[in-house]
Image (spheres, rainbow, N blue to C red):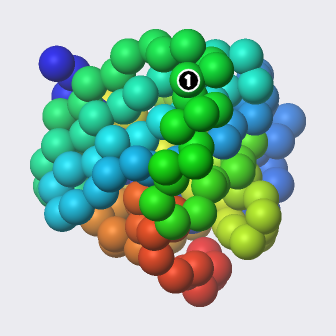
Amino acid sequence: MGKEVERKFLVSGNAWRHLAEAEIRIRQFYVAAQSGRTVRIRISDGHSAKLTLKFGDRARERDEFEYPIPLAEAEELMAFAIGRVIEKTRHHVRYRGYLYEVDVFGGLLSGLVVAELETPQNVPDEMLPDWLGREVTGEQRFYNASLALGGIPEIAA
């Protein structure tokens, strides 16, 4: 079992782009979701897939189990998706020794850009990059399950 400890931020501007080290095209969807638990399938770059189980409803920390699954099975499971299939491009951006995952959403969620910082440390505000906007940790409407199952949040940093 792994612990996922993360903070989420809206992203303002494009100053992060020149720092991007990697770019991953992601399609992800949920086959089960209820308060405090989700079952997600993620296909990365059309080449690999993972099944992820998340448990907990604390804003910054949840239990996470992740397993590789055959790509063909992931694509077949898409027929059982609840809500919308999320399309996004994930960029790995390092800043002051921390890895930020910046997700640029496509489709109905175009215009939404969210950065995640996974670290058990409490990073002081002065150590955060200027291109981060408002922190949305704990705001359910910005979590991927909510983006797949619910409405589209007003996008404002």
**Residue drawn at (62%, 19%) of the image:** 71
Q: Is residue 143 above or below residue 92?
A: below
Q: Quadrant of residue 78?
A: top right
**Quarter containing the C terminus:** bottom right
Look at the image and tell me whether residue 2 can be seen.
yes
Is 7 left, or right, of 64 in this rendering? right
Q: Foreground residue, 10 or 41? A: 41
Q: Is residue 61 above or below residue 83?
A: above
**Residue drawn at (55%, 13%) of the image:** 70
The amino acid type of the residue labelled 1 equals: Glu
Is 53 left, or right, of 104 in this rendering? left
Q: Which residue was labeled with disc 1?
A: 73
| Image spot of residue 29 (x, y percent) | 53, 48
| Image spot of residue 63 (x, y percent) | 17, 34
**Total of numbered circles in the picture?**
1
Residue at far bottom of view: 154
> Is label 1 in a helix, a strand or a loop?
helix
Q: Quadrant of residue 47?
A: top right
Q: Quadrant of residue 16?
A: top right
**Quarter containing the N terminus:** top left
| Image spot of residue 62 (x, y percent) | 19, 41
Is 29 left, or right, of 155 in this rendering? left
**Residue drawn at (51%, 66%) of the image:** 83
| Image spot of residue 100 (x, y percent) | 55, 36
Q: Foreground residue, 78 or 144? A: 78
Q: Is residue 58 above or below residue 153?
A: above
Is 145 left, or right, of 63 in this rendering? right
**Residue drawn at (82%, 42%) of the image:** 17
